[in-house]
Amino acid sequence: MAVSGAKEKIDAALQDWPGITSKPHRFGGTEYCPGRREIGHVHGDSLVDIPFPKTVRNELVKAGRASPHHILPDSGWVSIYLRQAADVDRAIELMRLSFEIANQRTTK
């Protein structure tokens, strides 16, 4: 139930953000970083994992915008399953939030 072309759409969106680099993720897929801090990774056209501070993660899960991480459900990570086009847009939106949080933390 993956969204065909989801990984390419996410990759194209993130490559336009300042300072973003991509590389293979240690557990498969593609990881995105502004500098050394990972803002999330994509597993093909079916799954996106994104780190957040635990308070933000809890708000996102409570609001139904993301699911607890598929392997580490008690961590600050969330998972977004890409089942329809709107999920891809939401994944990009939440990756942007992770990017903004990462940038705030590096400028403090």
Image (cartoon, rainbow, N blue to C red):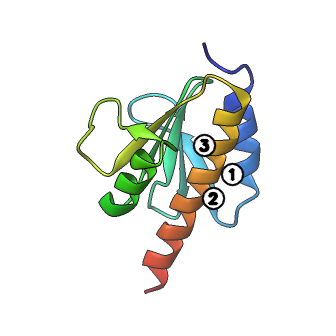
Quadrant of the snapshot with the N terminus? top right
Q: Dot 2 lies on which element?
A: strand
Q: Nearer the viewer, mark 1 or mark 3?
A: 3
In the figure, residue 23 lies in which quadrant? top right
Q: Which residue type does callout 2 highlight? A: Ile
State which tag comes first along the sequence, 1 or 3. Answer: 1
State which tag comes first along the sequence, 3 or 2. Answer: 2
Q: Are marks 1 and 2 in contact (CB under 8 Å)?
A: yes
Q: Nearer the viewer, residue 82 or 60?
A: 60
Residue bearing mark 1: 14
Q: CA distance from mark 3 to mark 2?
A: 16 Å
Residue 88 screen position, x and y as percent: 67, 36
- Residue found at the very far top of the displayed protein: 1
Query: Residue at the spot x=69%, y=66% of the render?
Result: 18
Sort mark 1 into few (<14), some (14-19) or many (20+) by Cα contacts within 10 Å: many
Q: Which residue type does callout 3 highlight? A: Ala
In the figure, residue 85 lies in which quadrant? top right
Residue 70 screen position, x and y as percent: 35, 30
Query: Residue at the spot x=62%, y=24% of the render?
Result: 45
Q: Dot 1 lies on which element?
A: helix
- Above or below 42: residue 59: below
Q: Nearer the viewer, residue 63 or 94?
A: 63
Query: Residue at the spot x=59%, y=25% of the render?
Result: 44
- Above or below 82: residue 15: below
Residue bearing mark 2: 20
Residue 47 screen position, x and y as percent: 52, 29
- Above or below 67: residue 45: above
Residue bearing mark 3: 91
